[in-house]
Amino acid sequence: MAFWLFKSEPDVFSWDDLVAKGETGEEWNGVRNYQARNFMRAMKVGDLGLFYHSNIGKEAVGIVQVIAEAHPDSTSADPKWECVDLKAVESLPRPVTLEQARGEPALKDMVLVNNSRLSVQPVTDAEWAAILKLAGS
DNA sequence: GCCAACGTTGGC
DNA sequence: GCCAACGTTGGC
């Protein structure tokens, strides 16, 4: 099983919005970046991810699960853009901020820390463990 | 609100 | 196929 990180501006779509969708989850649509799309194509049902609030908060706030593999993005007329479906699994006991991640040696190579613009990213097993530790879970 | 970093587009 | 111009993202 693989780990990922999904970014969203909470103004547009927040953690609470995903939680409100319950078990039905929601399409992770609107991604128009090839790298991000390719990561979504690599995802399997059951993979877990971090839900990160960009701009406001700048912190990982919850854990999500992939519930449907990549399919055409319903918000795009062009079928080349695909997305997965996600549901909220649980909130982190304590959100992990970008600042905390920057200060953690185990996370120095994390994509979040080094490439702030990629909206869907892979997370290594070690990084996943380090984030959950910082989150107090 | 500014600007640096990055990705994409389009002229040559 | 290169690269300048432009648009977008996201931290500050």
Image (cartoon, coloured by chain):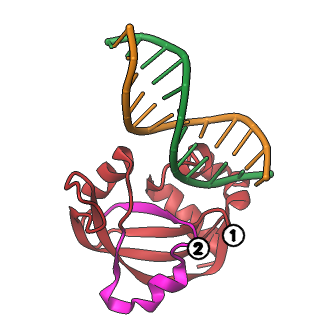
Chain colours: A red, B orange, C green
Q: Position of residue A100 (x, y in %)?
A: 72, 60
Identify residue for label 1.
A57
Check the image and report above or below for C9 versus C3: below
Image marks 1 and 2: residues in contact by CB distance under 8 Å? yes
The answer to whether residue A31 shows anywhere in this view is: yes
Question: Between disc 1 and disc 2, whose residue precedes?
Answer: 2
Q: Quadrant of the N terminus of chain A?
A: bottom left
**Callout 1 amino acid:** Gly
**Relative to residue A75, is residue A34 depicted above or below?**
above
Whole-percent x, y for residue A4 in the image: 42, 61
Task: Output the chain of dot 2.
Answer: A
C3, A42: nearer the viewer = C3
- The residue that appears at 33% across and 90% down in the rendered structure is A23
Question: Within 10 angstroms of label 2, few (less than 14), some, or many (20 or more) residues?
Answer: some
Q: Secondary structure at mark 1?
A: loop
The residues colored magenta run A1-28
Under circle 2, the secondary element is loop
In percent of width and height, residue A13 lies at 51, 75
Image vertical order of residue A28 relative to residue A121, above or below = below
Q: Is residue A120 left or right of residue A132?
A: left
- The residue that disc 2 covers is A10
Q: Which chain letter matches label 1?
A: A
Placement of the C terminus of chain A among the 4 image quadrants: bottom right
Q: CA distance from mark 1 to mark 2?
A: 8 Å
Q: Nearer the viewer, mark 1 or mark 2?
A: 2
**Residue at position x 49%, y 68% from top?**
A50
User: Do we see residue A42 in this rendering?
Assistant: no
